[in-house]
Amino acid sequence: MPAVHGGERRWEAEAAPGMAAARPLALLVLLVLGPGGWGFADPPRDSLREELVITPLPSGDVAATFQFRTRWDSELQREGDTDHYFLRYAVLPREVVCTENLTPWKKLLPCSSKAGLSVLLKADRLFHTSYHSQAVHIRPVCRNAHCTSISWELRQTLSVVFDAFITGQGKKDWSLFRMFSRTLTEPCPLASESRVYVDITSYNQDNETLEVNPLPTTTYQDVILGTRKTYAVYDLHDTAIINNSRNLNLQLKWKKPPENEAPPVPFLHAQRYVSGYGLQKGELSTLLYNTHPYRAFPVLLLDTVPWYLRLYVHTLTITSKGKENKPSYIHYQPAQDRLQPHLLEMLIQLPANSVTKVSIQFERALLKWTEYTPDPNHGFYVSPSVLSALVPSMVAAKPVDWEESPLFNSLFPVSDGSNYFVRLYTEPLLVNLPTPDFSMPYNVICLTCTVVAVCYGSFYNLLTRTFRIEEPSTGGLAKRLANLIRRARGVPPL
Amino acid sequence: MGLLSDPVRRRALARLVLRLNAPLCVLSYVAGITWFLALAFPPLTQRTYMSENAMGSTMVEEQFVGGDRARGFARDFAAHRRKSGALPVAWLERTMQSVGLEVYTQSFSRQLPFPDETHERYMVSGTNVYGILRAPRAASTESLVLTVPCSSDSTNNQAVGLLLALAAHFRGQIYWAKDIIFLVTEHDLLGTEAWLEAYHDVNVTGIQSSPLQGRAGAIQAAVALELSSDVVTSLDVAVEGLNGQLPNLDLLNLFQTFCQKGGLLCTLQGKLQSQDWTSLDGPLQGLQTLLLMVLRQASGRPHGPHGLFLRYRVEALTLRGINSFRQYKYDLVAVGKTLEGMFRKLNHLLERLHQSFFLYLLPALSRFVSIGLYMPAAGFLLLVLGLKALELWMQLHEAGVGLEETGGGSGPSALHPPAQGVGLTSLVAPLLISQAMGVALYILPVLGQHVATQHFPVAEAEAVVLTLLAIYAAGLALPHSTHWVVSPQAPDRGWMALKLVALIYLALQLGCIALTNFSLGFLLAATMVPTAAVTKPHGPRPLYAALLVLTSPAATLLGSLFLWRELQEAPLSLAEGWQLFLTALAQGVLEHYTYGALLFPLLALGLYPCWLLFWNVLFWK
């Protein structure tokens, strides 16, 4: 089940409930081995469902999530069980998302960007947003209850958040044309389902706060991340919607603009930073916020830290509300230099309405000089920690029928009625390592050569010189004369 | 390698050093001072140049036009500030939110070790407000800071106005790759220190502050802004930071580039730049600027909020708007455009600023002296100490050798071998006592302020300063107390050994200081070295004593104050100078406790005891 997530821009979970925090490019690779046949029992059947969900965020911005799902039947893999031994986890802390990522991604779509929802995917608009995340998921899906045969599902998602502050000049109204500079004209001919969902949940009691144009034919209600949501549904296959004016330009107007109050805070959010200064030591701190008024819940924290930050595991401290918080489970796999990073996994119980601080000290390693990146003074990235939690929900959710419910429900899996699953990525970090001045080798060579030359020279001198005791000089002419006379007289010389 | 040198020739060299010692010392000292004075002249100063590629070749177009908006913000801010009597936190929060920033506040409190009479504060508590502009589609790993310090007097309103107007302008742009933090601190540098410590989650100075809610990754560069008028005649830039740290020269080059581009009048140390470097005028003016920079860097105090950022390896400088009587004035748009340009270029940075010099002296905004060129000046001065120490060592050595060679003919030489041992142990007492004086000087003034205020009619701050001076002066009484402990048996060996140790101690200290803070090292060397070299218990003692007192660290400080005001063309009278001296003492102690400035402990624990050793040598019996 490979899944590739490309995302950029930290997205505040606080500002946008319902969107995960910054999703780094994470690659979960399952090496599929085993006696899987590559035969084709049936000709592959494509079925495409496409969907656009537009959510006005409490912060005033507008989030748009595209999803395209294709499913085909094949005999790619028969054996069901996956061996976790082959599970690999890798994270690239930074990947610049740009049109070079978007174009091949669009080519995977059956209608490319010619028809259907994908006409809206215009790069120059999509990259003028404040958040952009695109992903490709491939997974096997059982075709029957006993899972004797398998279909493959390719799901492509693209989430963008439009900055209402820049585009709307302070107004929070939006329309498809203003956001994408395109309107919808027809569904993709290959699609079996093509729908647009607009979140029209009114946060106030009266229903008259906003107005969508054209009026929706149907609405859809569901519990998303613990809150009840209402969506206006526009089915592009419904000829009435398109035929009226040959195009569909959805518009939303706020009759009474939502108050400028603080947006509702999600129950779980997190923050991560490097503390300390200097190039020797530092501390990785992760703050976990549980804002639920009365429920505590456990969180699984997964940290992968590169080996060049040498973690001191004995300094791992977890404090909530000023007291030490003992994790119920810790898995630590130490790093090996140049081979594998540290892996730290903990299950931490977050008390209700609290901030939990997880901190661990590290020492910055000195790399070999060829191991520095071409821009060593930029710093080195440390990948985000991953938080997985079952967050208690306020509203009970009914179990979901995956086939019937809209696609976007797959973004918010619900485990049971009282909890919902959240996976958060904290922000990646930039850590400066002690960086040599790279003109230093030259200086070092010069210095070493000088030292060697001086030492060698003097040792050579010492070894080849012959030493002899020098007689004191025999004095002046008078002394010599005196000695001559003394010798003549047979007296010992002076 | 001693084997290799010819003992006869070595002895000849030794004789040469001994015989020519005095002229060599004088020559070396004069060479050092001359070298330093020559630093302002073209072969030694070079034109500055941009080293960082990311900021060099590209050009940006400044589009800031929000001058009216800035003035409006400034007026509102001033009104709210007057009404509340403190930083209008709620108004700032609201306004920052309305221009589209993510706003957070941080409260802090600090009890100073004793009341700060210049800023009139003792128990300080305040709130910093900062808004973060999140760069679109970036992961908040890097950020830039624009900060405005607000103190209790109503200055810097226009700076806050400009900060808000710039924030509003920046918010509408899509090219940001780094987050930008707009920080308004209360109680000027104390607030900045509190915010920086909280941002890096460390506690260096014992300030109490609430943890920060919002962060934006590693700060790459910071600009502090001080602006108190709607129009400015010039922009002054301050680079000297805490403990003489300097930002990377490229940041200053960046500022200078935009000064030139916008046609702004920019000054350094409040001095206009001379364009003419071919005649004598330019270098002479450069020398004044250089001396001012040396004095400011030597003081080790942060000359603006930027100084505190440097500890965290954040390149920073402070821009001050000056409004003088000059005819031609610039409005806030010009200043805003300069800042916009600087931030856009800093936004281009791929790496931290590291290409250019970190250690330099500036005779002008467009000229610099690199470390390789100014270090010889300090080297020559320290050579005097080395030569003098060599002479003493040889005299001690040769005296011993000479006595042995004569073979026990006379009475005193028979006593010689034990005398050597006594000579060394006799050093322990003066060393310990002078060091103890240093420790007392460091600890007692602040510790004993309450005792002092109970027994004498003085305020705490005065008590601290007066105790400092009292302990300092008490150190001068030492020789009379130590000569009981010391019983020298050879008449000269005792003081020579002591002076040798003192010379080496001084040379080591000054060498280390000159490496980290050249200005301080040079200033101390220039004053302390000559007297340290000539001091001996014979000859005109009162003259030596007067010289020693005049070159003691405290007198150097006093002299530096006079020189500083003289260079600023605001000469001090004696009484004013004394007042300023007392204030500087109090500020020095306070800055050590509040920001971690190292000048006070350095003088109290290092140089003062060393100086006392020379005093001891002078009064050796």
Image (spheres, coloured by chain):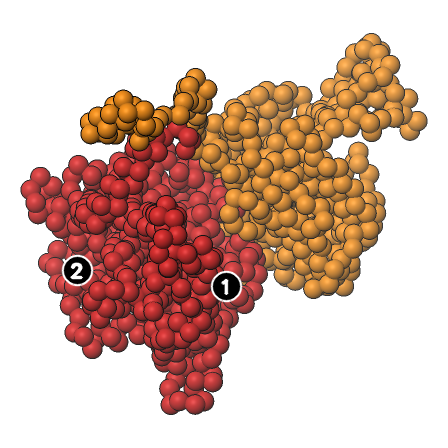
Chain colours: A orange, B red
Task: Please give the label number shown on residue B567.
Answer: 2
Q: Residue at x 31, y 73 (%)?
A: B583
Which residue lies at the image location 82% right of the left edge and 18% below the top edge? Answer: A33
Q: Determine contact: label 2, label 1, CB under 8 Å.
A: no
Left or right: B405, with B321 as reference point: right
The residue lying furthest to the left in this view is B279
Closer to us: B426 or B311: B426
Q: Position of residue B476 (x, y in %)?
A: 34, 73
In the image, residue B550 lies at what x, y percent? 24, 67
Please, which chain is the residue tagged with disc 2 on?
Answer: B
Which residue type does callout 1 highlight? Thr
Residue B354 visible here: yes
Examine the rendered structure and indicate whether residue B32 appears above or below residue B439.
Answer: above
The quadrant the C terminus of chain A occupies is top left
Q: Which residue is mark 1?
A: B205
The amino acid sitting under disc 2 is Leu
B182 horizontally vs B266: left or right: right
Q: Is residue B103 visible?
A: no
Measured in 3D between alpha carbons, the distance from the residue under mark 2 to the one under mark 1, in whole angstroms, is 34 Å
**Mark 1 falls within which chain?**
B
**Mark 1 falls on what kind of element?**
loop
Q: Position of residue A265 (x, y in %)?
A: 64, 57
